[in-house]
């Protein structure tokens, strides 16, 4: 599951049935050419058959595909004397996508388009979209077939997942991480301190790294290159205590005037998602991600330069200082 400290966008994905691939409110209308028209129904219980899951970054859905039929239910506005064979296709939400928070990290979900590929002839079925698009949580469509039922194609942000409409089998690819138990990695991040040898500077900087999520998609970064890699997503927070050093029989205190922080995951430079935040104590907090080979272990390394300025104390103490910190976390 996603780390609890990560920003969660609680979105219940909605299905907009019958929209064409572009936004709008037109539904496919029956025509004389019934063999190329998707017909819409209203009762999802009229479809019984193979069930399979479809997971996109905005949510998880259960699709049901029936056997080809020529007699359509009464709730379908079918052309008269139509002897075309149709496959019933019904869907309903099955819950939020795995690791939903890290996948979207505070952004809005995009729209997924659902079509049926009949060997080069694509038929628009529905959109899977965010809540600002009006629609319902369930849908049913009747797709004309000619021999082979074809493949269901679900596109989200440039990646198309395909499913065999006879078996429900999904073609493997970059989205595999949504359909397998990906590990949630954890590790202890030790504090740095209590001081720097040689000059008496005293400090403690604590490090917090909650559970690290492994996901195949991150908004703003896109999909992983292939099924062999994953995005690791981590929250990192560095919190310093006061900085001080004895000088001239008194104590000089310092404040943090700036930080320069770099994070890597398995020796791959991590990217900050959104803007890194300064904590009230002069610390640093950010959500970071890097695409790395899929594995059950990883190493997170944080390096930070901290710039200090004397706030109070004797003038014999240095007016400025800089501190170099390194945090290494073995994740498993």
Image (cartoon, rainbow, N blue to C red):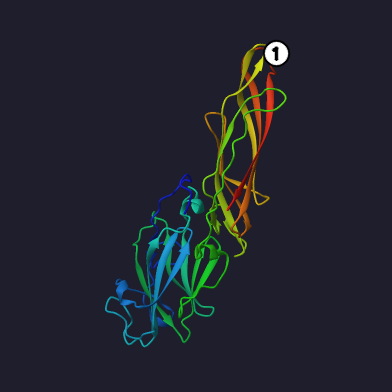
Question: Label 1 crowding class (10 Å Cα cut-off): few <14, some 14-19, many 20+?
Answer: few
**What is the x, y in percent for residue 186?**
54, 50
**What is the x, y in percent for residue 311?**
61, 18
**In the image, residue 170 above or below residue 133:** below
Q: 205 left or right of 132?
A: right
Outermost residue to the left:
74
Q: How many marks?
A: 1
Q: 203 left or right of 146?
A: right
Mark 1 falls on what kind of element?
loop
**In the image, residue 307 above or below residue 145:** above
Name the residue beneath numbered marker 1: 316
Picture quarter containing residue 174?
bottom right
Report whether residue 155 is seen.
yes
- Of residue 308 and residue 326, the one placed in the foreground of this image is 326
Picture quarter containing residue 13?
bottom left
- Of residue 226 and residue 212, the one placed in the foreground of this image is 212
**In the image, residue 84 above or below residue 275:** below
- Of residue 278 and residue 40, the one placed in the foreground of this image is 278
Report whether residue 21 is seen.
no
**What is the x, y in percent for residue 163?**
49, 74
Picture quarter containing residue 78?
bottom left
Q: 50 left or right of 320?
A: left
- Of residue 281 and residue 330, the one placed in the foreground of this image is 330
Residue name at image x 48 percent, y 55 percent: 99
Residue name at image x 34 percent, y 78 percent: 48
**What is the x, y in percent for residue 23?**
44, 61
Residue name at image x 62 percent, y 34 percent: 192
């Amino acid at each position: 599951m996603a780390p609890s400290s990560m920003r969660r966008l609680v979105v219940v994905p909605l299905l907009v049935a019958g929209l064409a691939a572009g936004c709008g409110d037109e539904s496919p209308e029956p025509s004389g050419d019934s063999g190329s028209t998707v017909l819409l129904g209203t009762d999802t219980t009229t479809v019984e058959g193979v069930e399979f899951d479809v997971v996109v970054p905005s949510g998880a859905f259960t699709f049901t595909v029936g056997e080809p039929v020529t007699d359509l239910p009464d709730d379908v506005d079918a052309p008269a004397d139509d002897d075309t064979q149709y496959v019933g296709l019904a869907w309903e939400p099955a819950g939020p996508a795995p690791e939903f928070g890290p996948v979207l990290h505070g952004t809005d979900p995009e729209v997924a388009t659902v079509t049926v590929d009949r060997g080069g002839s694509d038929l628009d079925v529905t959109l899977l979209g965010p809540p600002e698009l009006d629609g319902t949580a369930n849908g049913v469509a009747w797709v004309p077939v000619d021999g082979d039922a074809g493949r269901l194609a679900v596109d989200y942000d440039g990646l198309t997942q395909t499913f065999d409409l006879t078996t429900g089998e999904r073609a493997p690819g970059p989205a595999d991480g949504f359909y397998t138990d990906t590990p949630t990695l954890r590790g202890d991040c030790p504090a740095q301190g209590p001081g720097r040898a040689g000059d008496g500077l005293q400090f403690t900087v604590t490090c917090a790294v909650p559970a690290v999520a492994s996901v195949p998609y991150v908004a703003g970064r896109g999909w992983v290159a292939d099924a062999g890699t994953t995005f690791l997503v981590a929250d990192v927070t560095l919190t310093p205590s006061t900085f001080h050093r004895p000088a001239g029989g008194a104590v000089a205190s310092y404040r943090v005037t700036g930080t320069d922080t770099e994070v890597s995951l398995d020796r791959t430079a991590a990217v900050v998602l959104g803007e890194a935040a300064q904590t009230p104590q002069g610390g640093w907090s950010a959500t970071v991600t890097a695409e790395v080979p899929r594995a059950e272990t990883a190493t997170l390394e944080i390096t930070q330069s901290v710039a200090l300025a004397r706030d109070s104390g004797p003038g014999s103490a240095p007016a400025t200082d800089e501190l170099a910190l390194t945090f290494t976390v073995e994740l498993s």
